[in-house]
Image (tube, helix red, strand yellow):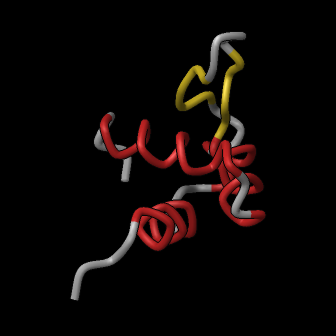
Amino acid sequence: MKTGLREQFLRVYANTPLNLRDEIILVFGNEKKPITWDVAYYEVRANTEASKEILKKLKKLDLI
């Protein structure tokens, strides 16, 4: 069974050590905003429009 990007992210996030969750994992948008694991989690959990782009970028970076 193929899992979606959201599920992959949530699995990786759950296994990420607490001390690494405040580390920047990507720079997002035209404003070049830094995104940490925690920020990405809140966006994905809320299923925002930004979360879709964040998930695509994390997949491209092989982080999920």
Q: Which residue is pictured at 41% across the width and 62% down the height? A: 5
Give 10 or 49, whichever is nearer the viewer. 49
Q: Residue furthest left?
A: 1
Instruction: Please tell me whether residue 33 is drawn above or below residue 1 in the rendered image.
Output: above
Q: Residue at x 72, y 66 (%)?
A: 45
Query: Could you say which quadrant of the image residue 56 lies in?
Result: top left
Q: Is residue 26 left or right of residue 2?
A: right
For the N terminus, give its image quadrant. Answer: bottom left
Left or right: 17, with 34 as reference point: left
Q: Residue furthest front?
A: 49
Q: Nearer the viewer, residue 24 or 59?
A: 59
User: Is any atom of residue 19 visible in this view?
Assistant: no
Residue 7: x percent and y percent? 47, 73
Q: How many marks?
A: 0
Q: Is residue 18 visible?
A: yes
| Position of residue 8 measured from the top left corner of the image (x, y, whole percent) | 41, 67
**Can you tell which quarter of the image residue 13 is in?**
bottom right
Q: Is residue 40 left or right of residue 62?
A: right
Q: Is residue 22 above or below residue 31?
A: below
Judge by depth and name the residue closer to the eye, 39 or 23.
39
| Horizontal and vertical percent position of residue 59 | 34, 46
Residue 63's x, y, as percent? 37, 45
Q: Which residue is at 63% across, 20% downward?
A: 29
Q: Is residue 36 above or below residue 13?
A: above
Q: Residue furthest bottom?
A: 1
